[in-house]
Structures are given as C-alpha cells and as structure tokens.
Image (cartoon, helix red, strand yellow):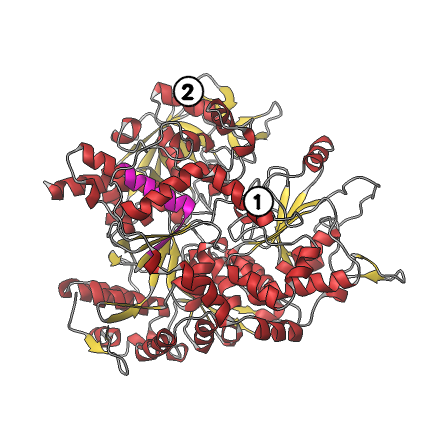
C-alpha cells in the first residue's frame, strides 16, 4: 500500500488517500479536469499501487492515453445463483484438480468478499390470479433445484468470504442498490469508494449511486474472486448531458427506452458513460437506477451518476445508518466526488439528449434498443385491425403480461403508477383478458410493503397481478408454462402471440417459446395491455372498455397524475420498510461458522451439478488453430441467448432428450439457465436457440433456414446443431465460428463461451465483439479475432466448405493472418486483429484459460 498520500478524513476517525494531491503532483490542476470514472480509478491506484508503478498508471488517466495496462481491484463481487453457482462449481472443480496434484484444496477461496443472491431459479408456474401463487412457485423452485441448492448451501461453509442470500428475497441488483452497496467502504480504518463486479450484465444498476459497478462474465468474476486485479486500459469515457424535463405522464421507463435507442445509435459500446446536466440532476435515484440498469442494452460498460443530494436522500430513504450516510457525504465532498466538483471536467466526447422529446414508449418487437413510440403503433404495423371472434383469442394476443425485473420494480414511481392504473381500472369495471398470464415479481420485498401501505396491492390483485415471487422471472425467460388450453390454441392456429413485460430483455425466443415477439413497457403500461389483451391495439386511443353509459374508456381515463403518484410515494415509501426487509437478511449473528468439507461430494446422477471437465480431454490440449472447419457462419447481432439460451427446456430439444433419458419428468425440466452447473446438460444448449440463423444451412431456394441447425462437412449433411457438435467431437475436429458485427450481445453468461469451447471451437472471427463475451471467450481459451474494416464473411464469399488456419504470434491487438483453404484448392490470406487486448489477456489465453492459469500458478507457488 502506498502511504505517501494517506491522510485523516475531517470529522471522522478514518483515513483516506488524497488522490487530488497525487494527480496534481504530476500535472497541476489535472484532477479537476478528470471525469468521475477517472477519479475513482485514480484513487484505487494511489491506494493499491507500488510507488514505482503509480506515476505511469496515473499518467494514462491524466493524459487520456491507452498504451499501458493498469490494475483495477474491485472491492467486492456480487453474483446471482446461475453464474455465481457455476463460478463456485468451477472453484470446486479447481479444488479437486489441485488436490489431485498434491495441493491443499482448502486454500482455494475467494479473496475478495463475494455475495451470492439466489434470484434466477424461480419460474412463474402459478400466475398472479391464482391463490397462494407465491408459495406454490417457491415450492416448485425448491423441488426442482434441490441439487443446486444443496451445492449452494455447501459453499456457505466450505469457502471463505462467501455470503449467500437464500431464494425468495429479491433480485441481486435491487438488493445491491437498496442495501449491499455502502457507496463508501471502510476497511482497516481507511475509507475508499465502493466498487464491484457482478456476474450479470445489469450490475451497473448501482452506478446510479456513483459506484463503479460493472457486469462481467463468470470467468472474469472468478479471476477477481481469487484476488487477481482486473487488468484494464483507460476506457472511453463519454459525457451524456441530459437537458430539459419529462412531460407529465411520462415515466422513467419511457425515458430509458428512448435513451437506449439514442445511445445504441451513437455507438457507445464498451464506454463508461457519465450522465450530467440539469436533466440528470432532476432525476430521482429510482429513475437513475432504471437508466443505469439498462447499460448493456445500449452497449456501454457503465452508466455513472455523480453523488449529490438525491443520493443522500435515497440512502436515508432506504434505511442506511445515519453514520454511513454522513460518511458518504463527507467523503464525496472531501475527495472531489460530489456533483458540484465537476464544473471543469473535460470529456473527449459529449452527447446531448433532450428529455422533453420523450413520449410514451415501448421497445420491441425483439430488441431492447428497438424503440417503439406508442404514437407509432399504427405506422409500424403493430396496432392494426383484427376481426374479433367469440371464444377465440385475437391476433396479437398478449399471453404474458409481467411486472417484473429489477429495472423497473426498483423505481417506486413506476410501481405506484401501476397500482393506481389498476385502482382506476377496477373502479370503471375493466378486467384482465382471460388469456393473459399476469404476474407481479418485484426485485425487493419492500415493494410489497409500500404497495400495501398505499392500499394498492389489493387493486393489482383484483386484476391478476398478485406477487408471484421476489425474483428474476419473466425477464430471464422464467415465465413458466401456459394454460394447456391457451398453448394448444396458439399452436393449432399458429397464432401471433406476444408478451409485454417491464423488463430489460426481449430477444427472440427468450421470454417464452410460444410468445413470437415481446415488448418492453413501463409497469403501468403492462397493466393496460393486460386489459387490452392484444398488441393489435392503439394503447393511447382505442377503447379498453366501456362504462355503464356506453362511453369508451381509454388510457387517459385511468392514467394517474404525476402529483398523485408523487404524493403517494412520499406517504407510503418509508425507511422502516427497508430496515424490516434487510436487517434480518444480513444478520451476521445467525450465520453458521462451522467449516465444511473442502471437497464437494459430487452427485453422479445430478443434471444440475457435475464436476467440470476443464482440466481434461479437449480442454487440456494446446490450441493449434490449424485445420479448423466452421461450425456456423452467423449474421450480425448474435446474442448470448443465441449462443446459450436461458429459457425453458422443451422435450424435443437436445437438452430435453438428455434430461428425459436421465429420468427427469418433463414438468421439471426447468430452464437451460438452472442446469449450467452440469456441463453435460449445458453443452446441449450450445447454439440451441430456435431463432438462430446459421448461414451454412439453406433451403432449396437458397434462403437461410431458421433453427438450431448445422451442416457437417465434408459430407454437407444438415443436422441438429448438437448432433453436428457430437459428430465433430468424435472426430476430434477443431472448429471455428465466423460472425458479423456486435457478436455476443446480451447477458454475461459464461456458458455462451464454455459451450463452444467444449465443442472444440478454437477461434471466433467476427466483425466486432461485445466486451463481456469477448473476455469470457478468452477465459475459456478461445481466441477472438476481428475482421479489419471492410472485410466480412460476405466480402470473402464464405460458404462453410472452407478449412481455416491462423498464423502469427498472439500479442495485444496484433495483426494475425487468417488462412482460408477453399474447396477449389485456392488459398487466401486475410489479415485479422487479435482481440487479446492486454498482456494479461494474452497470459490467460496462453495458459488455456483462467482456471488453468490459476491452477498452474497455485501449484508453482505451493511447490
């Protein structure tokens, strides 16, 4: 630790590191020009770096250079149970591997405090209009996930520095926002900014509090857990000035959907955004959190807001201790992290967004950045005339209406607005359409408390929106089964069926297998669409129903005023609700300190938890990057849902056939996500999305066929993707995947990289990569290569009959050569960029992946 700049923090008995003095010693006056992100990164360098390395690292920040790697040491790691569990399964497997080499497995522990929240395991099998839906769903969750929860319970006593929040308590991001982040940490008498990484792409939600918090893949999280810094170069830091103010009746959801489209268009992929200006100052932390939560949807790494009075008010509202709230304000003002300390900040790029331009919005039909203003429903062909037939569901039937996801349920204004819409609809005799599966799944128990306080929960219950869970449900594809009669009608009539949810993701095939398209909406709009019952509906103008006198009731007749919403929020949302929720949840006095067995007793017949194979077979050999055949040639915008879907497993899928063979009843197949601790099940999800377009597979007319399909070469035989993978694995055939732009968008799931790695894919060549997925590929020993500008799979005329080699020595951003051996005998050599961006990434790749690198270093140290 560098003690040169350690000073006393006025008004406290704590110390801090004077980053301003360290920066200004190199270049006088430089600190005031630094963005918020740079000031936080500089602080941890001053606190953690050795003096001889400090100056060069700080110069990178001051001079806005991106030539050298520098370390980032996040203060903590947060995980949901899917990626968090798989990360701990990996560590349990690592313990086994080290024990077999004569090492002490008990020494393999997270070094950085790690919090695992079980929030991704519950499916809405029982909807919000069913009696006791909450407990019934919890019972199903416990039954289906017994193996997983057995393993998670073992981790609590087997590993040091792991805390577990059990199921039924909320969503990790909302709990992080409302409780886990102290904003300012204190350790060993030193105060410093809270920072964290999380195994979910929506971890930046707590950026709303001024906390650098970024989503990473499970593999990168494992690296941080084990005490290694996350090596980085100065990111692009973009200032986003918010001007104007929202019009009456426009929600934070409407704002973020408009911002998401705007920022995607402005190409902020990988950047750290800092929101400022009068518009940002006026936003509540609830609205800021909605914007920060959607960071991956606009492609950025972080969505930061400054610490200000709104932050302090929120910390008080959510029941933080008075001493902690005072520390946050004192520390932020003393260290130049308070909002008014950024008058002279200089950004390399500034974007401006006028909030007064925002109207009522949806996003869809299949991407969160596909803005759909409700004023455009007719022009876009969404709302159009349809013939109503008695006893039949309409065209565009909304089969799922879900108030779900931390994105919007963390915002009290949104939730109160939904309750008021329900109240007003009930007064006028409106009702949910019978084919709509409705649900309310808040990310925190506090939501139920303040809805009860406001007497609005009964109103939501009357419309079928009772609480079904405190978990990530429909947004994560855990929407549960449909009523069999409704499902049959959807199938028999090939009905255009849809879903409306207050979530952050609506990718094809994600929300429900029988919802052909999905639309994101604010919670009050979700209620309105449950009443409308179809997307073929102009939600602003068409009649939701008729009053006793035959007058049409439209949305404006049930939409509450901003003044009423704000008054009820002020009266009903109270600090004691948050204390009542979180004090017992985080009560350390009730934790079992008994140390468990350092090695897990693997259950051989489990389809949920299995010893991982990353130190044997295909994964143990060196990647030669020679003689590779393409497994798939893919278009632009391939998401991690395409690469490894998370939704329900169907019997006719490869994973479904395997689970059936293992004796699991179809009703308990659960989701792909929940089986990711068992590689034998999870492998079968590789490229298993039914919405996939593999350009190697075409029909007789030459059109690309949709589905989880592959063409095995050299035979040219088309088969299911998993069967092709099995065929190539038996042949020990090295593979390559060719893709377009923005490869790997979406969730941070490591299985999008693990699946292809286990299949034998040695490199992905794409026009561009999303940040988290690229690091996951490297963590699994898969080489990411990027076509140079102007070169694509199309300009090269690739058809899948080719064989590929890669030549050259990997180095950060070096130029390698992709050698294409065509079926005609022609050989073409194409320059590609090695997307190992740092020396640390080269080191990880060269070792075969993160886990292999750690095992080698651990045993070298032990010997």
Label located before the other in sequence (2 or 1): 1
Number of residues whose C-alpha sits closer than 10 Å to that of mark 1, classed few (under 14), some (14–19) or many (20 or more):
some
| Magenta-drawn stretch contains 91 | yes
Which secondary structure dominates the residues rendered in magenta?
helix
Query: Percent from the top left, x then y, of residue 642?
Result: 50, 38
Report x, y in % for residue 520: 60, 53
Q: Does the magenta segment cover residue 319?
A: no
Measured as percent of width and height from the top left, residue 443 is found at 51, 56
- Residue 525 in the image, given as x and y percentages of width and height: 67, 58
Secondary element at tag 1: helix
In the picture of the structure, the residue carrying the numbered disc 2 is 727
Res. 95 mark: none
Checking the image for residue 136, the label placed there is 1
Instruction: Depth check: give the residue in front, 114 or 604.
Output: 604
Which element carries disc 2, helix, strand or loop? Answer: helix
Above/below status of 171 relative to 782: below
Query: Measured along the vertical axis of the image, is residue 550 above or below residue 158?
Result: below
Q: CA distance from mark 2 to mark 1?
A: 42 Å
The range drawn in magenta is 77-93
């Amino acid at each position: 630790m560098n003690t040169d700049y350690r000073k006393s923090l006025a008004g406290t008995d704590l110390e801090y590191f004077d980053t301003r003095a360290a920066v200004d010693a190199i270049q006088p006056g430089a600190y005031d020009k630094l963005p918020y992100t740079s000031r936080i990164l500089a602080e941890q360098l001053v606190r953690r770096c050795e003096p001889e390395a400090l100056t060069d690292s700080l110069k990178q920040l001051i001079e806005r250079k991106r030539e050298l790697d520098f370390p980032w040491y996040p203060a903590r790691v947060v995980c949901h149970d899917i990626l968090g569990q798989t990360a701990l399964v990996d560590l349990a497997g690592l313990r086994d591997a080290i024990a077999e080499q004569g090492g002490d497995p008990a020494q393999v522990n997270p070094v950085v405090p790690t919090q695992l929240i079980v929030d991704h395991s519950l499916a809405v099998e029982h909807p919000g209009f069913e009696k006791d839906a909450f407990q019934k769903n919890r019972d199903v969750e416990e039954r289906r996930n017994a193996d997983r929860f057995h393993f998670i319970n073992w981790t609590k006593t087997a590993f040091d520095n792991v805390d577990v929040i059990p199921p039924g308590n909320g969503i990790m991001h909302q709990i992080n926002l409302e409780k886990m982040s102290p904003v300012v940490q204190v350790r060993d008498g030193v105060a410093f900014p809270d920072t964290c990484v999380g195994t979910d792409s929506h971890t930046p939600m707590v950026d709303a509090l001024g906390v650098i918090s970024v989503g990473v893949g499970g593999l990168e999280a494992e690296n941080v857990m084990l005490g290694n810094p996350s090596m980085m170069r100065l990111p692009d830091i973009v200032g986003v000035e918010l001007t104007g103010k929202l019009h009456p009746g426009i929600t934070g959801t409407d704002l973020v959907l408009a911002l998401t489209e705007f920022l995607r268009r402005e190409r902020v992929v990988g950047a750290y955004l800092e929101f400022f200006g009068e518009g940002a100052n006026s936003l509540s932390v609830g609205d800021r959190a909605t914007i920060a939560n959607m960071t991956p949807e606009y492609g950025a790494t972080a969505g930061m807001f400054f610490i200000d009075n709104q932050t302090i008010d929120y910390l008080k509202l959510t029941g933080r201790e008075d001493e902690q709230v005072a520390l946050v304000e004192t520390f932020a003002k003393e260290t130049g992290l308070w909002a008014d300390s950024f008058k002279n900040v200089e950004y390399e790029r500034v974007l401006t967004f006028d909030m007064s331009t925002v109207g009522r919005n949806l996003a869809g039909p299949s991407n969160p950045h596909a803005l759909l203003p409700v004023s455009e429903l007719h022009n876009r062909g969404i709302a159009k005339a349809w013939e109503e037939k008695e006893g039949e569901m309409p065209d565009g039937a909304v089969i799922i209406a879900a108030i779900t996801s931390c994105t919007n349920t963390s915002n009290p204004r949104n939730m109160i607005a939904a309750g008021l819409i329900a109240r007003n609809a009930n007064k006028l005799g409106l009702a949910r359409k019978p084919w709509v599966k409705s649900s309310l799944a808040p990310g925190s128990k506090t939501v139920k408390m303040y809805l009860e306080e406001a007497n609005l929960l009964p109103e939501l219950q009357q419309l079928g929106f009772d609480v079904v869970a405190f978990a990530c449900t429909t947004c994560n594809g855990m929407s549960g089964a449909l009523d069999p009669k409704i499902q049959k009608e959807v199938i028999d009539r090939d009905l255009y069926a849809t879903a409306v949810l207050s979530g952050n993701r609506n990718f094809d095939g994600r929300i429900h297998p029988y919802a052909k398209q999905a639309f994101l909406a604010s919670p009050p709009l979700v209620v309105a669409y449950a009443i409308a019952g179809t997307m073929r509906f102009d939600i602003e103008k068409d009649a939701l129903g008729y009053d006793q006198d035959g007058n049409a009731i439209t949305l404006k007749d049930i939409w509450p005023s901003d003044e009423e919403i704000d008054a009820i929020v002020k009266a009903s949302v109270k600090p004691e609700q948050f204390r009542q929720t979180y004090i017992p949840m985080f009560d350390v006095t009730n934790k079992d300190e008994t140390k468990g067995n350092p090695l897990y007793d693997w259950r051989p017949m489990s389809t949920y938890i299995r010893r991982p194979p990353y130190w044997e077979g295909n994964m143990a050999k060196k990647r030669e990057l020679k003689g590779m055949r393409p497994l798939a040639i893919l278009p632009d915008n391939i998401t991690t849902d395409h690469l490894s879907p998370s939704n329900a497993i169907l019997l006719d899928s490869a994973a479904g056939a395997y689970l059936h063979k293992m004796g699991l009843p179809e009703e308990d197949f659960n989701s792909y996500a929940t089986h990711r601790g068992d590689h034998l099940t999870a492998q079968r999800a590789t490229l298993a999305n039914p919405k996939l377009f593999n350009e190697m597979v075409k029909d007789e007319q030459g059109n690309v066929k949709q589905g989880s399909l592959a063409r095995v070469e050299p035979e040219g035989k088309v088969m299911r993707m998993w069967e092709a993978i099995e065929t190539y694995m038996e042949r020990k055939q090295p593979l390559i995947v060719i893709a377009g732009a923005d490869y790997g968008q979406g969730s941070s799931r490591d299985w999008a990289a693990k699946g292809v790695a286990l299949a034998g894919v040695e490199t992905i060549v794409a026009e561009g990569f999303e940040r988290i997925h690229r690091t996951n590929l490297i963590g699994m020993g898969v080489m990411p290569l990027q076509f140079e500008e102007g070169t694509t799979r199309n300009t090269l005329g690739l058809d899948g009959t080719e064989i590929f080699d890669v030549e050259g020595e990997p180095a950060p951003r070096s130029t390698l050569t992709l050698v294409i051996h065509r079926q005609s005998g022609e050989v073409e050599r194409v320059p590609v960029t090695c997307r190992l961006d740092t020396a640390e990434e080269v080191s990880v790749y060269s070792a075969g992946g993160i886990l292999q690198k750690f095992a080698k270093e651990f045993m070298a140290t032990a010997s």
